[in-house]
Image (cartoon, rainbow, N blue to C red):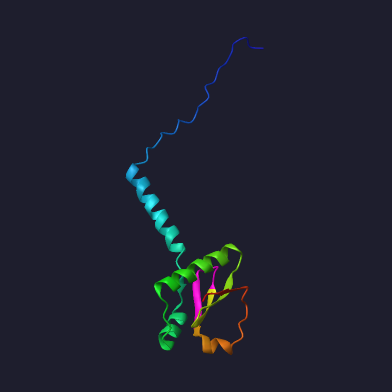
Amino acid sequence: MDPRVYTQTLHTLPKPAHKRVNQSQTNQFHKLLQSELLRTNELKVSKHAQQRMDVRGIEFTEDKWLTIKEKVKEAKQKGVTDSLVITDHAALVVSAKNDTVITVMNRDEAQSQIFTNIDGTIIID
């Protein structure tokens, strides 16, 4: 056996340089994140629903629309995916899962309709 000791150097990976994040980049990301979070809470109106509202002259006050949005959000948190929203003068079919109003009709039309694939109902007076 050879009495000499052989040594080998182990090559180590260089330590990663810590990249400092610019404060303005952090603020920009934070603003973008906040705007996206706020945007996802908006209730969208589909093209079909908007056309029905225009033809039938159905309009909602800002307060009523805010109430509808809040109730749809509450229903979504309870697991509702598709809901029927009944107000004093209109009925809306809303996809809570997609935060989208699918269709709108006035209350007179809604009385003679059968609503299917609805797993929740919201009544707003």
The correct choice, above or below, for 7 with respect to 39 in the image is above
Q: Residue at x 52, y 86 (%)?
A: 107
Percent of width and height locating residue 80: 60, 68
Work out whether residue 43 or residue 61 is closer to the camera in this orientation and state it: 61
Q: Residue furthest top?
A: 3
Residue at position x 60%, y 82% in the image: 115
Where does the image place residue 68, in percent across and percent down from the top left?
A: 49, 71
Q: Which of the 4 image quadrants contains residue 50?
A: bottom left
Which residues lie in the magenta part?
A: 95-104
- Horizontally, is 115 left or right of 39 in the view? right
Q: Residue at horizontal 45%, vertical 30%?
A: 15
Quarter of the image where one finds residue 123: bottom right
Q: Position of residue 37 (x, y in %)?
A: 45, 58
Q: Residue furthest front?
A: 125
Please tell me whether residue 101 belongs to the stretch shown in magenta. yes
Up-down: is 112 above or below 61? below
Image position, residue 124 (x, y; %): 52, 75
Quadrant assignment, res 58: bottom left
* The one of 71 and 17 positioned closer to us in this rendering: 71
Q: Is residue 36 left or right of residue 7?
A: left
Q: In what quadrant of the picture does the N terminus appear?
A: top right
117 falls in the magenta region: no
- Extreme-right residue of the structure: 1
> Which is the main secondary structure of the residues drawn in magenta?
strand
What residue is rendered at 48% in x and 31% in y?
Answer: 13
Q: Is residue 94 above or below residue 107?
A: above
Left or right, residue 104 beside residue 26:
right
